[in-house]
Amino acid sequence: MKINSDVQFAIMAEELKTLKKKEHKSKSKTSSSKRYQSDSEDEKPERDSMIAAKHCQPDPYHHHRKERKSKEVTVELPHFHGSNDIDTFLDWEMKVEQLFECYHVSEERKVPLVTLSFQGHALHWWIALVRDKSLHHEPAIAYWNDLKSALRRRHIPSCYHRELMDKLHRLNQKNISIEEYRQKMELYMIRVEIREDEIVTVAKFLSGLSLEIRDRVELLPYRDFHELVQICIKVEQVLRQGTSRSSYSNSYSKTNYEREGKSLKEKPRENPTKAIVLENSKKREKHERKQEPLSKTEPDIEFSPKQTSCEKLSEPFSGA
């Protein structure tokens, strides 16, 4: 019995210890909560004042958001009629992307804006495409890149890039100006979407120049492609001025020559036999003019047609 009482006493002592620990924990929690409440009550007016100040201060991005929304609403894309001309379609595509970037058009609004710009055959094609996708249970076109690829498949043939690369490699200046030659080269490179080093572009540009300009430009220093183009334009202007001056001097000398009464046309060549006959006739006339006074003093001598020259001289003088 004594052992049982000792065991019960030990159990009761342990239970008392656990109860004391629980009371201590509960007291510490209540004290911390009260302390937090007091701190929060002290900081409450400060928090309220900060919240009020935030609401009173203007949002710096609020004005920009309003401007973006207004710009997105007022943006107008150029109309597209579904032309088969590749250059017309690519120019329209470049203009649309430029407007999207300028007005910060969101991705979900690009496709509706582009489809609103369709007119004529382009609108008919779009309606047929939407109908086919709904019939085949395919997802609708919701992004501008997907719509752009669909438009390119319709309006640009598969051999277009190959032909354009061929035109770019065979491009020469020929009879066009330097500026036109540069514009053609840049347009072909944009269409083909070539990204190459500037050294390659410079070599390609020089290979297509005319020989007169290339021989002069290759000896001059230049830093980049744009400076090379400017030098070529100056050389072209100098060559044109030289040709215009030479043509002007030739025309001026011709007019002066004609004013002096001398034509540049060659005189017609005379027949040599006619010239000899004329010279002989002139000599005879001169000779006859010299002999005219002698014939007046001397008596006339009649010659018979049958007499020779020796017989005429041997006959006696009739007046003797």
Image (cartoon, grey):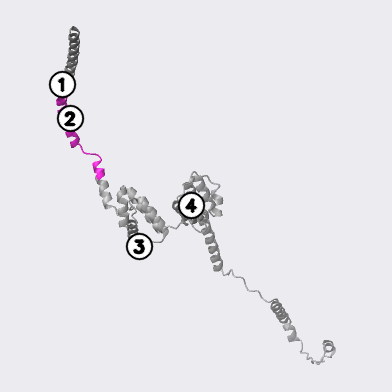
For the residues labelled 3 and 4, the Cα–Cα distance comes to 44 Å
> 10 Å neighbourhood of mark 4: few (<14), some, or many (≥20)?
some
Give residue 121's mark: 3
Q: Amino acid at mark 2?
A: Arg
Assign a secondary structure to mark 4: helix
Residue 147 relative to residue 320: left or right: left
Q: Nearer the viewer, mark 3 or mark 4?
A: 3
Give the position of the C terminus as an image quadrant.
Answer: bottom right
For the residues labelled 3 and 2, the Cα–Cα distance comes to 63 Å
Dot 3 or dot 4, earlier in sequence: 3
The residue that mark 1 highlights is 30
Give the magenta range: 36-65
> 10 Å neighbourhood of mark 3: few (<14), some, or many (≥20)?
few
Q: Nearer the viewer, mark 3 or mark 2?
A: 3
Q: Is residue 142 above or below residue 61?
A: below
> 10 Å neighbourhood of mark 2: few (<14), some, or many (≥20)?
few
Circles 3 and 4: CB atoms closer than 8 Å: no
Give residue 47's mark: 2
Front residue of this view, candidates 49 and 311 = 49
Circles 4 and 1: CB atoms closer than 8 Å: no
Give residue 233's mark: 4
